[in-house]
Structure formats: structure tokens, C-alpha cells
């Protein structure tokens, strides 16, 4: 079992950004996660199957992938009210090749398109490249999810390829887009342009007490 110091390096209790804070999941987060993953629209945007996850599937996912002590998973909280709005994780971690797969869900529709997912993705990329020493972080997204693709590009991911007509949605086939961020390119991009939140004019916020 990893030591407490190693776990702290690998999976710190929180990762703080300007507008969002990533925190370890708590058991009480299950009710929000269940509501999000039972949403048909979220299932349409993120799942290969057309149906939402069952309650039993969500509970297994929550305990195995989000709540487990060594899971590289975080709850996304929005400042200043500390509102729980989503989840983000790394999977398929490959230390030999310095790679991982990235996942993120903003579960509250009233906060879609406001940049919270973009900042959370930037925080996770910083964690991957600066703290974990990874070289590559990849993801996949459906071609009809234009909002998510724009967000990923803002945070540092680039389109690498596509699985042609891999997804059936809305009466037609769509491509599945493959994207990735490389450490060298991400560091150079950040040195040149800063993060998306730094480039965007926002009102200053304070953390909830």
C-alpha cells in the first residue's frame, strides 16, 4: 500500500483554481452523481449506450471509480458558494509510457458553457504533467458535442483523429473524436498564452469560508 506521503503527492485532498476547486469525493456526493447520470441528455452526450445508467450501475461506479482511496478522481466545486457541479477522473494510467485517459462531467445544465469544465480540465492537466510527471493525456468525445470539443481545445487538448461513424445518435451516425494533450506542447502553450481562466476577464472571487 502506498505511504501517506506518496498518496498525498499522487492524490492531494484538493486542487484549487481561480473559479473551481477539485476535492476528494465524499459519500454524500452519491445523490448528486446519481441525479446527473440518470439524466437522458447527459447520457446522450457521454455514453455509448442510449439509456442512462441504472441506479445500481451508478453506485458501483461511484464506489469503485470515484470514492476509492487510490482513485484519481475529484469532485468539481464552484467558488464562492462551494457548489458541487461535476466529476473528473483519470483512468487507464500507464506509468511505463507516461499516459492516462481523461474524463469530465459537468452535471448541472445551468452551468454548461461557463468555463468551469475548461478550468477543471486545466487543473487536471497541470496535475498530470507537473505533479505526476505524465507525458500524454488523451480523451474521446462525440462529434456532435461541439461545446465539449471547444472546451477541451481551450484547456490544451488537440484533435488527433476520429473513429468514423462510430456513434448512432439523433437518427444518424457521428464520428468519435480522439483528442490528446502532450506535456511539452502544454507547457509551451501555457508559457505563451497562460491558462484559459487567466486569458478571460472575470470578476474576482473569494473562497467560501
Image: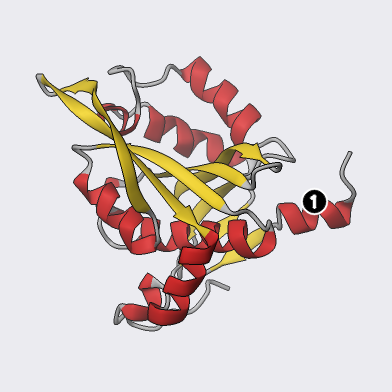
Q: For numbered disc 1, what is the local secondary structure?
A: helix
Q: Residue at position x 37%, y 60% from top?
A: 118
Identify whether 118 is placed above or below 28. Answer: below
- Name the image quarter holding the N terminus: top right
Image location of residue 174, percent across then percent down: 18, 28
- Name the image quarter holding the C terminus: bottom right
Mark 1, Cα crowd under 10 Å, few <14 / some 14-19 / many 20+, is some
Q: Identify the image's colour scheme: rainbow, by chain, secondary structure or one colour.
A: secondary structure
Answer left or right for 13 relative to 194.
Answer: right
Front position in the image: 140 or 8: 140
Q: Residue at position x 51%, y 48% from top?
A: 137
Q: Which residue is mark 1?
A: 7
Q: Residue at position x 31%, y 39% from top?
A: 161
Image location of residue 186, percent across then percent down: 47, 65
Quadrant in which residue 47 is drawn: top left
Quadrant in which residue 22 is drawn: bottom right
Image location of residue 132, percent across then percent down: 68, 56
Front position in the image: 8 or 92: 92
Total marks shown come to: 1
Identify whether 29 is placed above or below 150. Answer: above
Is residue 13 visible in the rendered structure shown here?
yes
Answer left or right for 9 relative to 181.
Answer: right
Is residue 21 visible in the rendered structure shown here?
no
Amino acid at each position: 500500500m502506498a505511504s501517506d506521503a506518496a498518496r498525498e503527492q499522487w492524490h492531494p485532498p484538493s486542487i484549487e483554481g481561480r473559479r473551481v476547486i477539485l476535492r476528494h469525493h465524499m459519500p454524500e456526493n452519491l445523490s448528486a452523481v446519481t441525479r446527473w447520470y440518470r439524466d437522458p441528455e447527459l447520457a446522450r452526450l457521454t455514453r455509448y449506450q442510449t439509456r442512462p445508467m441504472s441506479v445500481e450501475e451508478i453506485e458501483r461506479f461511484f464506489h469503485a471509480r470515484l470514492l476509492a482511496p487510490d482513485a484519481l478522481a475529484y469532485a468539481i466545486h464552484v467558488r464562492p458558494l462551494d457548489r458541487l457541479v461535476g466529476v473528473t477522473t483519470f483512468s487507464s494510467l500507464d506509468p511505463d509510457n507516461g499516459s492516462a485517459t481523461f474524463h469530465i462531467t459537468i452535471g448541472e445544465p445551468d452551468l454548461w458553457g461557463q468555463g468551469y469544465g475548461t478550468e477543471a480540465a486545466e487543473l487536471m492537466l497541470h496535475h498530470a504533467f507537473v505533479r505526476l510527471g505524465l507525458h500524454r493525456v488523451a480523451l474521446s468525445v462525440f462529434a456532435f458535442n461541439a461545446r465539449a470539443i471547444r472546451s477541451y481545445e481551450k484547456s490544451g487538448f488537440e484533435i488527433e483523429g476520429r473513429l468514423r461513424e462510430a456513434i448512432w445518435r439523433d437518427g444518424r451516425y457521428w464520428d468519435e473524436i480522439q483528442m490528446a494533450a502532450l506535456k511539452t506542447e502544454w507547457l509551451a502553450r501555457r508559457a505563451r498564452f497562460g491558462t484559459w481562466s487567466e486569458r478571460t476577464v472575470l470578476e474576482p472571487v473569494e473562497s467560501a469560508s
